[in-house]
Each structure stands twice: as structure tokens, then as C-alpha cells.
């Protein structure tokens, strides 16, 4: 039962990264690739109808974490107090950037929100990458199941490091490169002409960087938490996850060289899926590793809710997920195809 | 030296962020219903002004919705960031309702809002109407799960406690048949329609008074007044009445504090005005309707209502004057809303409402008061529950994140204060701009870029 919720949670988080990942990626190269108002509106309209729904995957994952593993939710949210609050502020900034820009037809107003949108997107990805880094590295969980992390201490990986150290900063770089490529693949699907050429160019340039950073990430993870490989040696079938990730990466190179945008986009989604599920596979059954004493770690068994509640949840979670997938299918189907701005376009 | 302790700051931050947040959803939920009404009228009559009206309100709705989302996400996070011990204790129960809100309400709401705002041409009139209905449903389902969560904190049911102190769900059915839930839900929802109706009336009154977009103004006034009178009366009876009886039954000490009743009385009076003096345990300058409280609570004129002195002092809500004033402001304003809307309906019936300028002035200036009434209503519920976080089970003082220092908590509180001040100002400026431009405003066309 707890294992199911571990998988369910991992699934929702991965869905969030894949879906909102392309919104965030778009935000990151937004200022550089879209030069005039028309192009910027084209980018905003590419993500416009879907970004809010995509963000809901984060909220729903947070809610499901609260529901399935209340102790982990309590411990991690209070322990990551500062970065989480800053993430909230950045989410506010991104939403305002997207939503308020269109309301006043003034160059300065638009430029201001463009910058807010782009900077919020970049910093969000930096924090999300660091968050994943913290989960992999572990935090200074005490015997009572709580901890509190400063934003940074000495930038070295020690039992009481801050949110940012060299390892988590490396993870931030991985996240920035990966999602920028993912966003570029998405935009190359949704646009045509010169904007599409620029998006393809972003993707072409970023792919080697993603490869390089991924290799570094493998080495660094093995260096600081070699025991993450244990699950792989006891259950060899688990190698399917990283292998899937690598196949996705290969696809990103291959389909990009053919300018096959849709398949390149799928490949970057598969890359994210493979890498993140591979991480989850290595972490299981630990949810949050204690750097002070492994016996303080929060696991799927010592932080989960009661079995009756988890059982009831199984029913509504599955139904809710089917509904949500249905909505998303319909939404993406309705807004399929390339975004072409005309004089009286609805939207941004 | 006066030391602001971490507990106080966590409370202040939550109180501030939740009160600011709820300024937006109350309009979202109420306006979603009124937009459905406008869209329905457009479908039924084929009158294009209804469609234009719906599009106009959709613009305000979109802004308001965005503000509600950006201020709402912090609420979901703050259970964990600021109230970690509460979350660890209660997550086994309220995790259910909060997770369900995400799955069943937010996905529905956000998906169909995208379709509603961007898809009018792609969907056609019928599907577009349907997407408006689904946005409305999503926002009201969201309200249901939040009220179910709050109802459990007010009157915990369907749980058992494990040896480690955590509360776990024992009955899913009881969670949603909580006797507290029904009245609190309908009272909150119709309160949100009061806000939306008064906002719609205010814009309508402004258009008619300034003789600008008067045709739309008249439609807004009619829709707003009819919706407004129904929900204003519903707020007092039966929903407010039902909610009051719940308080009397499940939180009698709260009832005594709300009413400023220190002594137990047979045939207790209803306080209209007066200032509670907690130090000397009496009510100053009272104006009281005799026997009325006994009647309203127990339907008997001489029924006994227990006063605060009957209860140990540590069980008293910890801020009785604020609770007392919140409650009285809510009830007082609610009564005024009934008077205003009934007068409006009378004028509408006599076909005088569009020319009665004095009355339109009242309507135009009245819209902030439902916001105050909804806020003070929530203050009554939340202050009334004190000193408990989960009534009778967990004290508020035992629920906050003790691993977050007061300095870190104050940092984020100040940050939220600054950001929300900016968000609030932007919202007011942009909504005013939309209202001044009016439903007939056409966006200046952006010339296509030469290839």
C-alpha cells in the first residue's frame, strides 16, 4: 500500500516536471528568442491555455503528499521553510508576468512583466533542481523527524549543509539545461517560421550540455550517495529506468538532427521520466534521508497515514487521475496545432 | 524587552495570508455562478448584450481568479511550512480533503478556465456555456473540500487517535456527513454570491449613473439584485440560523463569547450593540433585545443559555472582544444587505430602480461591505474555535512549526506583506481599468508583422 503511494507521488511529481517543465523552459529563453511583441505573444499563447493546469500538478502532488505521508509533508515543508516560501513568491511572479502583461498596452508595462516572467521561471527551475538535489543528498533530520535548513552554509556537502552546496547547485544546472531543452522542443512544435528556427537552435545548442551535465550528475551522485545503487544490484530490472532516460537523451539528439520536432519533444519528456523514475527507484523506500543518522530517515512506512485512509484514497485517487487525464487530453487536443497570431487572436 | 515569539508570528502570517486570499475566491465562486446565469440568458434569448456582458465579467473573473490562485497556493503550503506539528497530527484525516480538492476541483477548474477564456471561437456557444458551468462546478467543489477540512477542525468526526498521538481517518462517510459541514458550506457559498451580486450591482449602478454603457448597467443591476436578494435572505435564514445552532450545540463557550454573555441567563437577550469588558466580565453600554438569544438558539423564549462564567477560563476563546466584534459586524452587515436588496427589488418591481439615483449611489458604494462581512464571518469561525486548532483535541499553541525560528517566520511574513500589497494594488488598478473601458471596448488591433 505505502509502495503504491510512493509510486503515485513520484508519478504526479514527474507529470508536473514534464508538463510545467516546458512552461518554465519557455520562460527561461523567452527574452532571448522572442524579439518583438508579436513573437512574445506567440510564446505566451503557446503555453497560455495550459500553464495554469500544468501548475495544478504541483499543487495536487503537494496535497497527495500531505494525504499519504503527513509526517514527511510536515517535516520537509517546515525544514525547507525558506526555499519553499521563495518558490511561492516566484510562482506568484511567474503567474503575474503571464497574466498581467496583456492588460495595459504600453511598452514599458510589457517589458516589465516580460522580465518578471523570465526571471521567475529561471529561479524556479534553479530551486526545483536544488530541491531534487536535497532529496538525493539528504538533510539533517533529527531524531524527532524534523530539521531546518538554511539557504546555504559553506557550499560543501557536509552533514549539515544548506539548501545550496556544490552538489545541489550542480543539480540546478542539470534542471536548467534539461528544461530549457524541453521548452525549446515544445516551442518548436507550437510555432512556425523564424521563431521555430530559433527554438530549434536553442535545443541544438543545449543538448550536448544536457549530456555533459547528466554524466557529471551520475558521477557526483555515486560519489556522495553510493548506496543509491543498492536497489539496482538487488533488482536488476530497475536499470530499465536509467536506460529509458538515456534512450530519451539519444532521441533528443537524433530527432533534433532530423528537425522532427514532435518526436524530439517526446524524447525530452522520456528523458525526464527516465531520470526521475530512476532516482525514485534508487531512493525507495527512503523518502528523506538523514545525513546525521540513517535511522532517523523518513521512509514510506514510518511517515505514512493510517491504512484505512490510504485504502479509501486509492479509490478516489484512481478515479480523480482518470478524470484529470481526460481533461488534459481534451485541453491539449482543443489547443493542438501551431499558434499563429492574427490581428484579433483571443488570449495573450 | 517585548519579544515577539514565533507562535504569534506564525499566527499572524496565516491570518494575514488567508484573509487576503479569501478576498479573491469569494468573488470567483459567486461570479462563476452569475456568469453561468448570463451565458444561459444569452443562449436562451440570443441577445448579444448578454454574451458581451459575460465576456466583460469573464475578463474581471480571469484577473480575480489569477489573484486567487497565486494567493491560494501559499495556503496549501503553509499547513506544512508554518503548522508542521498540526499537519503531522492531522494529515491522516485532512490530507484526504485537501488532496481531493487538488484532484477533483483544481484540475477541473483550471482546465475549463483555459477553455472558457481562450476557446469561445473554437468551442461554439453550447460547449462554451458548458465550460462556464464546469468552471463554476470546479470552484464550488473546491469550496466543499475546504469547508469539509475546516468543519473537521471545528467539529472533529470519523477519526481515531493512534498511540503516537496522530489522528487517522476511521470513516470517510462521516467526514462528509459532518453535521457542521452542511450549514457552514451553504452559508459560505451563498456569502460568496452576496459579494458577487453586490459587485455586479455596483458596476451596473456606476454605468447607469454615469450614463455610460447604461444598457449593460441595467442588465447587471437586474441580475445582481435578484441574485442578491435571494442569497442575502438565505444568509440569515436558514443558513445563518443553522450555523448558529451548530455553534450552540458543539461549541457553547464560543456562542457565549460571540454574544458577550458572561452570566448564565434564562431568557437571554440578543445584544445589538455593546462593548465586552473581559477584565471585569461585563458588557458595557448594552442595547439588548430581551429573550431573543434564547429564542434564536433553542426556539424557546425562556431557554437557558450558559454564560462564559460557567466554563473554565482556559477554554475561553483567547480574543473575546475581537470575536465579539467580528460576529456583530457580520450579522449587522448581513441585516443591512437584506434591507438594501429588498428595497432594490421593490424599486425594480415599480420600474423605478434605474431612475432612483439616490438608491444607485447606495448600491455603487456598497460593494466593499460584503467583503467585510465574509471576512468577519471567517474571523468569527476561526477566533471562535480558539484556543483549539482542532476543537477539543489539539491546541493552536501545539500546532505550529517549532523548528522554524521567529526570525525566519518574520522574514516571510514581511515578504508576503510586501508582495500582497503590490498584488492588491495591481488588481485594483486593472479591474478599474476594465470597468472604465466597459463591455464594448475593443482591444486596439496589433498590426501583423510583415513577413
Image: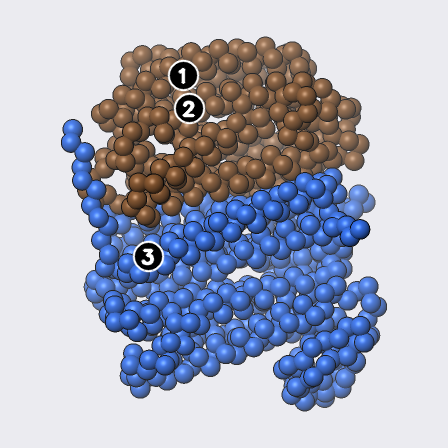
Q: Earlier in the sequence, mark 1 or mark 2?
A: 2
Disc 1 packing (10 Å; few <14; some 14–19; many ≥20):
some
Mark 3 Cα shell of 10 Å, populated few (<14), some (14-19), many (≥20): some
**Rendered view: B262 above or below B442:** below
Q: Considering the numbered disc 2 on the image, is that residue within a helix, a strand or a loop?
A: helix
Q: CA distance from mark 1 to mark 2?
A: 8 Å
Residue at 64%, 38% (x, y): give it.
A81
Q: Quadrant of residue A161?
A: top right
Residue B32 x %, y %: 40, 59
The numbered disc on residue A236 is none
- Please give the letter of the chain rendered in brown: A
Chain at numbered mark 2? A
Image-based side of B8 in relation to B242, left or right? right
Q: Which mark is residue A206?
A: 1
Q: Nearer the viewer, mark 2 or mark 3?
A: 3
Q: Name the foreground residue: B286 vs A261.
A: B286
Q: Tell me, for residue A180, which label it has, or none.
A: 2
For the residues beneath circles 1 and 3, the answer to whether they share a chain is no
Instruction: Give the spatial CA distance, label 2 vs label 3.
Output: 35 Å
* Residue found at the very far left of the displayed protein: B450
Q: Quadrant of the C terminus of chain A?
A: top left
Give the colour chain B carries in the figure: blue
Label 2 CA crowd tier, 10 Å (few <14, some 14–19, many 20+): many
Provide residue B120's location: percent of width, then percent of height.
27, 50
Residue annotated with mark 3: B434
What is the C-alpha distance between the residues marked 1 and 3? 42 Å
Against B318, residue A283 (above or below) is: above
Amino acid at each position: 500500500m505505502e509502495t503504491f503511494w510512493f509510486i503515485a507521488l513520484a508519478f504526479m511529481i514527474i507529470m508536473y516536471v514534464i508538463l510545467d517543465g516546458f512552461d518554465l523552459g519557455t520562460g527561461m529563453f523567452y527574452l532571448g528568442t522572442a524579439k518583438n511583441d508579436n513573437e512574445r505573444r506567440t510564446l505566451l499563447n503557446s503555453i497560455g491555455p495550459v500553464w495554469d493546469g500544468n501548475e495544478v500538478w504541483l499543487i495536487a502532488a503537494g496535497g497527495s503528499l500531505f494525504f499519504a505521508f503527513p509526517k514527511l509533508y510536515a517535516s520537509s515543508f517546515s525544514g525547507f521553510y525558506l526555499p519553499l516560501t521563495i518558490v511561492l513568491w516566484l510562482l506568484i511572479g511567474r503567474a503575474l508576468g503571464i497574466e498581467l502583461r496583456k492588460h495595459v498596452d504600453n511598452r514599458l508595462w510589457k517589458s516589465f512583466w516580460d522580465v518578471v516572467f523570465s526571471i521567475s521561471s529561471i529561479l524556479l527551475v534553479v530551486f526545483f533542481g536544488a530541491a531534487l538535489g536535497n532529496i538525493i543528498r539528504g538533510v539533517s533530520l533529527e531524531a524527532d523527524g524534523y530539521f531546518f535548513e538554511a539557504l546555504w552554509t559553506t557550499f560543501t556537502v557536509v552533514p549539515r549543509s544548506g539548501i545550496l552546496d556544490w552538489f545541489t547547485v550542480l543539480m540546478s544546472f542539470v534542471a536548467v539545461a534539461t528544461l530549457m531543452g524541453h521548452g525549446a522542443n515544445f516551442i518548436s512544435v507550437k510555432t512556425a517560421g523564424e521563431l521555430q528556427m530559433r527554438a530549434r537552435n536553442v535545443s541544438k545548442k543545449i543538448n550536448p550540455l544536457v549530456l555533459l551535465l547528466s554524466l557529471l550528475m551520475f558521477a557526483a551522485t555515486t560519489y556522495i550517495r553510493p548506496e543509491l545503487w543498492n536497489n539496482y544490484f538487488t533488482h536488476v530490472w530497475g536499470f530499465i529506468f536509467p536506460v529509458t532516460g538515456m534512450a530519451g537523451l539519444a532521441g533528443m539528439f537524433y530527432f533534433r538532427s532530423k528537425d522532427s520536432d514532435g518526436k524530439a519533444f517526446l524524447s525530452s519528456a522520456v528523458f525526464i521520466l527516465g531520470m526521475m523514475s530512476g532516482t525514485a527507484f534508487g531512493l525507495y523506500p527512503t523518502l528523506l534521508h538523514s545525513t546525521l543518522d540513517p535511522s532517523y530517515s523518513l521512509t514510506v512506512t514510518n511517515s505514512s497515514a493510517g491504512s484505512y485512509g490510504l485504502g479509501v484514497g486509492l479509490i478516489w485517487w484512481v478515479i480523480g487521475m482518470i478524470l484529470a487525464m481526460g481533461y488534459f487530453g481534451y485541453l491539449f487536443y482543443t489547443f493542438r496545432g501551431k499558434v499563429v497570431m492574427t490581428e484579433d487572436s483571443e488570449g495573450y | 524587552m517585548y519579544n515577539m515569539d514565533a507562535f504569534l508570528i506564525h499566527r499572524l502570517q496565516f491570518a494575514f495570508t488567508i484573509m487576503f486570499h479569501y478576498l479573491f475566491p469569494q468573488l470567483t465562486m459567486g461570479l462563476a455562478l452569475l456568469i453561468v446565469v448570463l451565458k444561459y440568458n444569452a443562449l436562451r434569448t440570443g441577445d448579444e448584450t448578454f454574451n458581451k456582458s459575460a465576456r466583460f465579467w469573464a475578463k474581471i473573473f480571469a484577473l480575480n481568479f489569477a489573484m486567487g490562485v497565486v494567493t491560494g497556493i501559499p495556503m496549501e503550503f503553509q499547513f506544512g511550512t508554518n503548522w508542521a506539528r498540526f499537519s503531522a497530527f492531522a494529515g491522516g484525516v485532512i490530507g484526504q480533503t485537501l488532496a481531493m480538492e487538488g484532484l477533483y476541483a483544481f484540475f477541473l477548474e483550471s482546465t475549463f478556465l483555459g477553455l472558457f477564456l481562450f476557446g469561445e471561437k473554437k468551442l461554439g456557444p453550447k460547449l462554451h456555456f458548458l465550460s462556464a458551468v464546469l468552471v463554476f462546478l470546479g470552484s464550488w467543489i473546491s469550496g466543499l473540500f475546504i469547508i469539509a477540512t475546516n468543519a473537521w477542525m471545528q467539529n472533529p468526526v470519523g477519526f481515531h487517535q493512534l498511540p503516537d498521538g496522530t489522528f487517522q481517518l476511521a470513516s470517510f462517510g462521516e467526514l462528509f456527513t459532518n453535521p457542521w459541514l452542511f450549514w457552514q458550506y451553504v452559508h459560505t457559498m451563498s456569502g460568496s454570491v452576496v459579494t458577487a451580486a453586490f459587485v455586479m450591482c455596483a458596476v451596473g449602478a456606476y454605468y447607469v449613473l454615469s450614463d455610460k454603457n447604461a444598457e449593460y448597467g441595467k442588465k447587471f443591476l437586474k441580475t445582481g439584485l435578484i441574485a442578491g436578494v435571494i442569497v442575502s435572505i438565505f444568509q440569515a435564514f436558514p443558513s445563518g440560523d443553522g450555523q448558529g445552532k451548530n455553534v450552540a450545540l458543539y461549541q457553547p463557550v464560543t456562542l457565549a463569547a460571540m454574544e458577550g454573555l458572561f452570566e448564565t441567563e434564562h431568557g437571554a437577550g440578543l445584544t445589538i450593540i455593546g462593548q465586552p469588558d473581559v477584565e471585569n466580565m461585563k458588557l458595557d453600554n448594552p442595547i439588548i433585545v430581551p429573550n431573543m438569544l434564547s429564542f434564536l438558539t433553542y426556539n424557546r423564549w425562556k431557554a437557558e443559555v450558559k454564560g462564559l462564567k460557567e466554563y473554565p477560563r482556559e477554554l475561553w476563546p483567547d480574543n473575546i472582544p475581537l470575536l465579539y466584534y467580528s460576529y456583530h459586524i457580520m450579522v449587522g452587515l448581513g441585516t443591512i444587505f437584506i434591507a438594501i436588496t429588498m428595497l432594490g427589488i421593490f424599486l425594480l418591481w415599480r420600474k423605478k430602480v434605474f431612475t432612483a439615483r439616490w438608491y444607485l449611489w447606495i448600491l455603487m458604494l456598497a460593494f466593499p461591505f460584503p467583503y467585510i462581512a465574509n471576512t468577519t464571518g471567517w474571523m468569527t469561525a476561526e477566533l471562535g474555535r480558539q484556543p483549539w486548532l482542532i476543537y477539543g483535541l489539539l491546541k493552536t499553541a501545539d500546532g505550529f512549526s517549532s523548528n522554524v525560528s521567529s526570525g525566519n517566520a518574520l522574514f516571510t511574513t514581511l515578504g508576503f506583506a510586501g508582495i500582497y500589497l503590490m498584488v492588491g494594488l495591481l488588481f485594483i488598478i486593472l479591474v478599474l481599468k476594465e470597468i472604465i473601458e466597459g463591455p464594448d471596448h475593443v482591444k486596439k488591433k496589433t498590426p501583423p508583422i510583415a513577413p
